[in-house]
């Protein structure tokens, strides 16, 4: 695997990040970075959601950011999915955004809480039809012994969604991650990466520069 060291990590030109001019709270800076990433990279709203299982073992998968607001950073899934079950038992999570085309990542972690049922239902009904069908198929991450079973389940779910366009599964849940820490990381070709951490303290945020 010698070629691993030969692959470029970031483009030649990288944006400049000046922590001294960062806003007092992390959401404004995150939204600025997200919008900027959206001008340069695919799926800037894709995020790695990390949880722990019943044995304390870490688990991670890529999902889509749904919103950012007063309640925190929002993602959504079925409460019966592996990640939903894990969040039900240990309501803490980490989110990691990585935009290699800009040499940037954002990391945050904190407690997780479910949204009100009507908010979760609205989230589901805003999904494209194919995504709603996928959610009604169920059995996420279970062993599939015969692909024909998936085809049959998909056909049944599609009929259900067409007949009930305004119905959301009771298990569909929007989850809010309300971070205790948010870190912004800007790559530098001289390896002196710029890191700024926001940490909750005393009802506000403390900004701290970190060593690379």
Image (cartoon, rainbow, N blue to C red):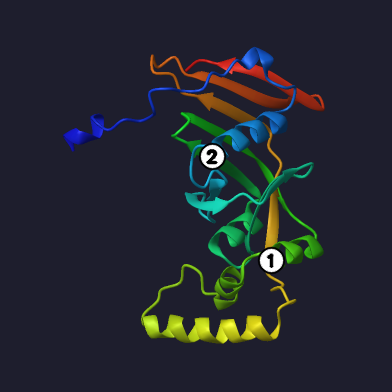
Kindly check if marks 1 and 2 are in contact, taking CB atoms under 8 A apart as contact: no
Question: Residue reaching furthest front?
Answer: 39
Identify residue for label 1: 124
Percent from the top left, x then y, of residue 125?
71, 68
**Looking at the image, residue 204 lies above or below residue 114:** above
Q: Gap between marks 1 and 2, in whole Å?
A: 23 Å
Q: Nearer the viewer, residue 212 or 15?
A: 15
The residue located at (50%, 51%) in the rendering is 62
Near mark 1 (Cα within 10 A), the count class, few <14, some 14-19 or many ≥20, is many
Percent from the top left, x then y, of residue 6?
23, 30
Res. 9 image quadrant: top left
The residue located at (76%, 56%) in the rendering is 115
Identify residue for label 2: 97
Percent from the top left, x then y, of residue 171?
68, 69
Label 1: state its secondary structure. Answer: helix
Q: Nearer the viewer, residue 79 or 119?
A: 119
**Looking at the image, residue 141 lies above or below residue 25:** below
The residue located at (49%, 50%) in the rendering is 60
Near mark 2 (Cα within 10 A), the count class, few <14, some 14-19 or many ≥20, is many
**Looking at the image, residue 77 lies above or below residue 95:** below
The residue located at (79%, 41%) in the rendering is 70
Label 2: state its secondary structure. Answer: strand
Percent from the top left, x then y, of residue 201?
76, 24
């Amino acid at each position: 695997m010698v070629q691993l060291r030969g692959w470029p990590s970031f483009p030649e030109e990288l944006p400049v990040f000046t922590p001294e001019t960062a806003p007092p709270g992390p959401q404004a800076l995150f939204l600025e970075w997200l919008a900027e990433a959206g001008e340069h990279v695919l799926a800037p709203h894709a995020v790695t959601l990390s949880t722990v299982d019943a044995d304390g073992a870490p688990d991670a998968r890529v999902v889509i950011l749904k919103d950012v607001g007063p309640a925190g950073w929002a993602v959504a899934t079925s409460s019966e999915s592996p990640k939903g079950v894990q969040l039900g038992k240990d309501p803490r999570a980490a989110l990691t955004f990585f935009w290699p085309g800009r040499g940037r990542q954002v990391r945050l972690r904190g407690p997780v809480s479910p949204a009100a049922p009507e908010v979760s239902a609205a989230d589901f009904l805003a999904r494209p039809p194919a995504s709603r069908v996928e959610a009604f198929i169920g059995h996420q991450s279970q062993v599939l012994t015969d692909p024909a079973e998936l085809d049959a389940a998909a056909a049944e779910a599609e009929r259900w969604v067409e007949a009930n366009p305004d119905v959301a599964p009771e298990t569909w849940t929007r989850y809010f991650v309300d971070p205790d820490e948010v870190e912004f990381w800007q790559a530098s070709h001289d390896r002196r990466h710029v890191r700024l951490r926001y940490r909750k303290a005393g009802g506000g945020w403390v900004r701290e520069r970190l060593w690379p």
